[in-house]
Amino acid sequence: FYFAPDTYLVTTIQGKIVEANYAAERLLNVRRKNLCGKPLSVFIDLESHHDFYLKLVKLKTSSLEADASNHQVVLQDWEILIKPRNQQAFSAAISVSNIFDADLKLIGWRWLIRDITHRKQAEATARKLQEAEEVNHLKTRILRTVSHEFRTPMNVIYISIQLLERYTQLQNETTGKLFFKMRKAIDHMVNLLEDIMIFSQAEAGKLQCNPSILEVVPFCQNLIDEMSLGADTKKIVLVEKNQLTIGYWDAKLLRQILGNLLSNALKYSPPHSEVILELERQGDRALFHIQDCGIGIPLEDGDRLFEVFYRAGNVGTIPGTGLGLSIVQKAIELQGGAIAFSSEVGVGTTFSVSLPLRTP
């Protein structure tokens, strides 16, 4: 009893301490000899006082009704706040068993008290993780639903614009510009929905990599031609540093990677500027460098740049979702690649994507 590692107390049925072991001395921060004679209630935190007295009444009732052979635990793992002398309150689990005298009369209880602070902290952490996981699942479902539901009306609008262009009799410069703006807006929405779909798949662990043989230069040139239609006065230049002809990657994911990086480069670059896409081979890896002369990335934003929905502090009113770079990173990692960047505010940014050169 006295040298047991757990805290043990013996009290009368009125709740007065009559015996305590050395573990109780350490737990309650009071010498053993000074514990004896004190009500156990003085070591119960005020927040738990009401619950303690209710339990004490129930203990008296149930124990007095018990026969003398019942020395078993009558209250087990009751959680309560214990307040040691001159210390912070902590969570404890208490178990209580009956004590009878020689005449089989109930004279008190033996209390086993365990500090469960670490357990409660672990439970709280687990709850927070569970809540965060549920929120993430909900977010993923919402994003997937939004992406799916918006895609059909966007396609209808796009086809309607094409029909209007084909059958409009009075084609002039003004209507041509309007049709171009409408197509550009639809393309932007479709790309955004594609980003949302890929992001939701990645969050759910369902983003797949289906590699195929790609001719690198034609692939990049087609992407550049497509993106140049909405680049206004800005220009994308393709530079081939050495022989990089064939790759074995997922075409959809590579398009997301280069498309998002080129889109950002155009978005944050000034009018009449050039964005450079440089292709390079280094050993068994392919390198894609996307260089712009835009606003640059502040040093303090570098560590968080690939976080979901995070945007650098200097973007101002330039529109964006904060999804693009997160998607880029996930698509690169799924193919065994890596991404790095260098930047100077007011000068520009270069993103470098490294992908392994595999064979089918």
Image (tube, grey):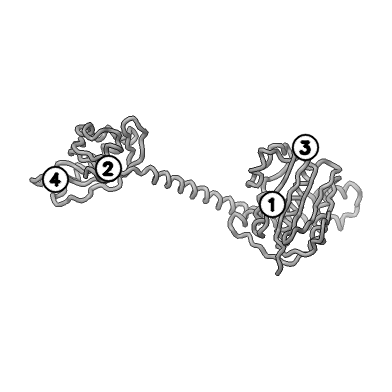
Question: Mark 3 or mark 4, which is nearer to you?
Answer: 3
> What is the x, y in percent for residue 155?
74, 57
Name the amino acid type tagged 1. Ile
Decide: few, some or many residues near mark 2? Use Cα within 10 Å; few <14, some 14-19, many ≥20: many
Q: What residue appears at the point 81 percent right and 50 percent down from the top-left corner?
A: 276
Marks 1 and 3 in Cβ contact (< 8 Å): no
At label 3, counting other C-alpha atoms closer than 10 Å, the crowd grade (few under 14, some 14-19, many 20 or more) is: few
Q: Which mark is residue 100?
A: 4
How far apart are the two marked residues, 3 and 4, measured between alpha carbons? Answer: 84 Å
State the separation of the CA atoms marked 1 and 3.
22 Å
Q: Is residue 222 left or right of residue 96?
A: right
Residue type at mark 2 is Thr
Mark 2 to mark 3 CA distance (whole Å): 65 Å
> Which of label 1 and label 4 is nearer to you?
1
Which numbered disc flags the more N-terminal residue, 4 or 2? 2
Q: Position of residue 200 (x, y in %)?
A: 62, 54
In front here: 224 or 84? Answer: 84
Residue identifier under label 1: 339
Relative to residue 212, is residue 225 drawn left or right?
A: right
Name the secondary structure under disc 4: strand
